Image (cartoon, grey):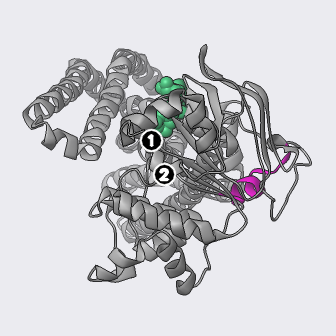
Amino acid sequence: MNALKWFRTFLAEHRTRYIVALSLATITAVCFIINPIISGLIVDDVVMGGNYALLPTLLLIFIAMTIFRSAVRYTYILIFERASQGILFRMRDYVFRRLHEQDFSFYNKNRTGDLMSRQTGDMEAIRHFTAFTIYSVYENVLFFLIAIVMIFLVDYRLALCIFCVVPLTALTAMKQLKSIRPAFHKIREQFSNLTTAVQENIGGNRVVKAFVREEYEIEKFGKENDAYQAAEIAAAMIWRKYVPAFEFFLSLTTIVLYLAGSIMVIGGTLTLGELVMVNGYIWMINLPLRMSGWLANDYQRFVTSVEKIYSTIDVEPDIKELDGAYTIPRINGQIAFRNVSYTVENEEILKDVSFNVMPGQTVGIIGATGSGKTTLMNLLCRFYDPSDGDILIDRVNLKNYDLTSLRGNIGMAMQDVFLFSDTIEGNIAYSSPGCTFAEVKAAAEIANADGFIMKLPEQYDTIVGERGVGLSGGQKQRISLARALLKDPAIVILDDTTSAVDTETEAIIQESLKYLGNRTVFIVAHRISSIKDADMILVIEDGSMVESGTHEELMEKEGYYARVFKQQYGDFD
Ligand SMILES: Nc1ncnc2c1ncn2[C@@H]1O[C@H](COP(=O)(O)OP(=O)(O)OP(=O)(O)O)[C@@H](O)[C@H]1O
Ligand SMILES: [Mg+2]
């Protein structure tokens, strides 16, 4: 499927609406024939012919037609708007769902700002097209054709005179469009840069302030702003260059009509009324020419936007559920890594890692920063698939579980804590919607968060700012821990979760974690104190598992672990 075909599937859902609306548009366009005819009759029969009795009837028809036309036009514009909103609603929903199907790699590759503009600016371009451009193009084509037919019906010689000029106007319109297209493209590109600059600055405003880089950022933004202004002005200049020629040719049509028409009226081969009538059709020729540039630009924008949106949703996620994947309500928590390697763009991040964990065991993972600890846990959650080797849970390959079962059984407190702008209760309960307040409180107690939460003015109803603004680092970590524990997972992953809390609080948390019952717990940490009591400790260095065993075993080995221990506790022995 290509982008436009994909778009048509949404359009097709509103086929009936579009057919009705376009039929109404046809009726309106045809109605435009009548008023010039009436004008002609008024001149020929009433003014020249002296049939004054006809005037009220003609005027009445004139008024009635105008009212009828307006009502029909109002109706179809409304139908277009409704259809367009319906299409947009479905598209936004579809794209949002697709975004949720994408995995970590997708979000590593795509800029937030770009993904945001797919759902905002690009959707707006589609709205404009489906609500306005479609009927405008249709109307204008009809106007043009009707006018040609009508003028030919009145007098073919007059028509030929007028149509000597029309190609000149059309040519100018085409040239204008062709030369302005790159300028319009540049505007859209520059606008996207401007949005990205704003978005990054709002997101990173604390860093900007901390390093007193406001002036630098303002200057950087100023450059983008300048470039945007320049792009807009450049487009306006191109547009303006063609305006005199364009307007000249448009009035030339009228001049030719008056010249040829007058000669014919004087010569007696055309009535004055017929001249007035043709004059009434001239706008139906000029308007489409005038609009053609804008409409072609609208179409171009629409196509670009559909293609951009389609290119984001057309990405197949790397992580796929197998056909017939297991659904399992509760796993036991036996885990085996068998020669697991993970490579990204030729960089080996994990190399040949193997270990076994029994249900209920606590595993500590330690290693230098960047050694691959988080990656190891990401593989266990199947956020990425190993490039080599297998990961088994309860003797079944991870890939055989459906993702909901797998991740539903894992409670992860991520290293990079993310809190939603919601109440504390809402943030903790995020992992298990429908839980009771007592459960939320119990989870917070295990995470040693209840104490500080109760001291807040609004306690559990306190709204935390975007990404948890207003809470300390350690407080955020404890809320994230409570969130991971609340869903009562079979496997708990704590990735650096207590790094920002003091050792005393950490000890309290560890004590309560012991009473969690039968679950497999992974604790990733830099502090020996966080993992010392684990049933098994894995030491990761440069993507390889270099040591494993209990604290005592590792101390005896006198390797990396023992060195870190001595650094942190001193060489007392
Ligand atoms: N998506 C990715 N693409 C490319 N490289 C990555 C990606 N994620 C991580 N890495 C690289 O993999 C290595 C291991 O990263 P990882 O986050 O697992 O380290 P870590 O042991 O958790 O470190 P820390 O203790 O600082 O949290 C790093 O060198 C990192 O740059
Ligand atoms: Mg990490």
Is residue 304 in view? no
Quarter location, residue 234: top left
Dot 2 amino acid type: Ser
- What number is the disc on residue 526? 1
Please identify the quadrant where the C terminus is shown. Answer: top left
Mark 2 and mark 1 residues within 8 Å of each other at the beta carbon: yes
Q: Residue 108: where, in percent of width, then height?
A: 51, 33
Dot 1 amino acid type: His
Q: Quick one: 450 or 48, which is closer to the camera?
A: 450
Q: Residues within 10 Å of mark 1 (few under 14, many from 20)?
A: some
Specify start and end residues of the magenta stretch as a single range.
400-410
Is residue 397 in view? yes
Task: Label 2, secondary structure: give it.
Answer: helix
Q: Quick one: 141 or 525, which is closer to the camera?
A: 525
- What number is the disc on residue 530? 2
399 vs 388: above or below: below
Q: How many labels sit on residues?
A: 2
> Could you tell me which residue is drawn at 48 percent across and 65 percent down?
509
262 vs 572: above or below: above
Q: Residues within 10 Å of mark 2 (few under 14, many from 20)?
A: many
Please identify the quadrant where the N terminus is shown. Answer: top right
The response on whether ligand 1 sits within 8 Å of label 2 is no
**Cα gap from disc 2 to disc 1, whole angstroms:** 8 Å
Asked whether residue 305 is drawn in magenta, I would say no
Q: Residue 55: where, in percent of width, then height?
A: 37, 66
